[in-house]
Amino acid sequence: MTENNLLDSKPHEINGKVEILTEKMETLPIQSEVTNFKPKVKDRKFLRVGLVLVTLGIAFGGLKFIQERNISAKPNLETTLPNILSVQAIPIKLVNSYSVSQSYTGIVEAKRTSELGFEQSGLLTSIYIEEGEEVTKGTIIAQLDTSQTKAQKAVLIAQKDRAIATLKELENGARPEVIAATRASLLQEQAKLRELQTGPRPELIAATRASLLQEQAKLQELQTGPRPEVIAATRASLLQEQAKLQELQTGPRTEDIEVARSGVLDLEEQLNLARLQEKRREELYTEGAISQEQFDEASTQADTLQARLEQAKSELEKLETGTRREQVEAQQARVRQAQSQLDELIAGTRSEQIEAQRARVGQVQSQLDELIAGTRREQIEAQRARVGQVQSQLDELIAGTRREQIEAQQAEIRRFEAQISEIDVVLRKSTLFAPFSGTVSVRHLDEGVVVNAGQGVVRLLEGGERKVRVGVPPGKTSSLRVGSQQEVRVGERIYSARVLSILPEVDSMTRTQTVILALPQAIAPGTVVRLGLNQTHEMEGYWLPTSALVWGERGLLASYALVPPSQSDLNLPAGTYQTEKRMVEVLHTEGERSLVRGVLQPGDLIVTNGTNQLAPGQFVKSEVRSQKSEVRS
């Protein structure tokens, strides 16, 4: 084989393995061939380099062939292992009990809420409080009209004073002047009786005849109509009343108000000066420098200026307030009256006026006829009876007051006092007071309305602590104690509430007991409050995330526990486990966690996610987390 054939030898691939194939080399005496062939020195260098390269290629090919055969002879461990999933697991721990939290709803209300109204009906004249305004106990809220009631009280006071005076007179006995007056009245009545018995005197007949002539003259004047001067005087009176009405309607002038205001300022300055003088005089009087009379003069002057100032302020207030409506209405009535009189005079005398005057003339005529005819017997008997009555009064005065009269007068005084006390009660009830401190939440009425007894005027909410009524099942109230602090939730905020009382009765509709709690003032009435109560149940189990539960056999629940691999000859990665299905029973579910019991032991690793992809005995890699990160304790 020639040198070129050796260099041209190429490797070939057989079954994916590299082999270097060479042609059969004939056994030739190289020495002789070399001897016979004498190349040049340059060719010899190339020949040696080529031989080295061929030798290196053969060696590399052989090593590669041996390596690939060894690799193909040893199976790949990773390709023979099953698919390993990554899961998360937690160690479980045994608990002896669990708590169940339930919330109950209530509405916040003020400690006291009152619809304030009057005990009697009347005209609502004033409301002094607006909605949202805070008031203290005893503040005046509203007022009814009391003008008629005050007038009744004034009448009763006058009657009481008169009765007291009469009682004093009865207790002191009749005064000599009263006895004398009664005796004089008796003499007068006796004189009238003698006059009736002797008949009318000529001068009485003459006086009656003169009165008759006067009435007849009036009748004639009415029949002839009013005189022009009377009409003119009535018209002048009408113009005067109309001018007064116009002045009242126009109101006080600005210059009058300014004059009154300047007068008030002047009097205030004088009063301040007088008070200073009074103070100086008092100091001098104390030191004995002046007399009592000089000090009294200064004090009297200051009091006089004070009275004048009050009067000036009253006049200024009247001018600034303007004419009252009732004054204008009264003046309008006087104008109408004057106009009516003028209209009557212009229209002439009406027939009914003439008839009335004619009746008076007839009456005086009949009196004159009786006097001329003489006294009748019944008149004498009536006068004799009046004489007897006055005689008995005089006898009582002389004999003195009887005890029963004094007692009767005392009873009359007590009757007036009782009526005045009743009027005072009515006056007190005409003013609406705040029964407690709080805030006015609603104003139902405005001024000028006639309110009925018991009708609400404003709604008053007491300030301070709020309270809430929460219906709780009877079995849960045993965990509550009066005075204990409980947490309540208002929206997203939590407050501490104090248990005020637990009502003993069970509501027939809701079958719950009412628990009353005290809340801070910051919570507005009407807010919804939730009271949370925890109840502890004694029961052993393990808390698991709900996601760790899967359906097992016969509709039961199970979980996957991680155990060491059963085959120890496998070269498994670190942290590799096998799954084992454990049957469990759910005792309680709370949100995203469940309390279970079953074939579990404290410290077992339980898979918490991806359980729907697992099967018993499957290899998995686990990332162990603490139980607090997955499940609440």
Image (tube, grey):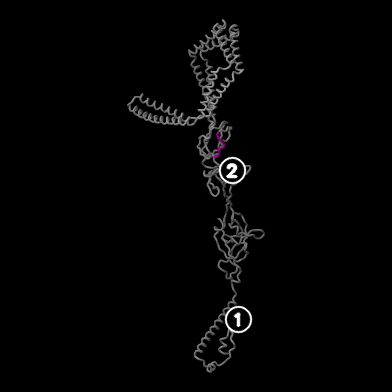
Rendering quarter of residue 371? top right
Going 56% across and 21% down the picture, which residue do you hit? 342
Look at the numbered disc 2 and give the secondary structure of its residue.
strand
Residue 514 tag number? 2
Viewer-side residue, 49 vs 163? 49
Residue 529 position within the rendered picture, expressed as x and y whole percent measured from the top left: 56, 46
The outermost residue toward the right is 554
198 and 157: which one is in front? 198
Using a 10 Å C-alpha cutoff, classify the residue at mark 2 as few (fewer than 14 neighbours), some (14 to 19) or many (20 or more).
many
Residue 361's x, y, as percent? Answer: 59, 12
* Viewer-nearest residue: 543 or 437: 437
Give the residues in magenta. 441-447
Which three-letter amino acid code belongs to the residue tagged 2? Thr
Q: Residue furthest front?
A: 228
Left or right placement of residue 82 versus residue 260 in this view: right
Q: Nearer the viewer, mark 1 or mark 2?
A: 1
Whether 221 is drawn above or below 562: the answer is above
Residue 184 is marked as: none
Residue 232 pos. (x, y %): 53, 20
Q: Position of residue 258 (x, y in %)?
A: 44, 31
Q: Per the image, is 445 magenta?
A: yes
Q: Disc 1 designates what residue?
A: 13
**Total numbered labels:** 2
Please name whichever residue, 313 or 89, is drawn nearer the observer in this view of the structure.
Answer: 313
To which quarter of the image does residue 11 belong?
bottom right
Residue type (three-letter) at the residue carrying disc 1 = Glu
Q: Quadrant of the C terminus?
A: bottom right
Instruction: Judge the density around disc 1: few (<14), some (14-19), many (≥20) Cα neighbours within 10 Å.
Output: few
If you read the primary sequence from the N terminus, does the residue marked by circle 1 or circle 2 appear first? 1
Secondary structure at badge 1 equals strand
Magenta span contains residue 163: no
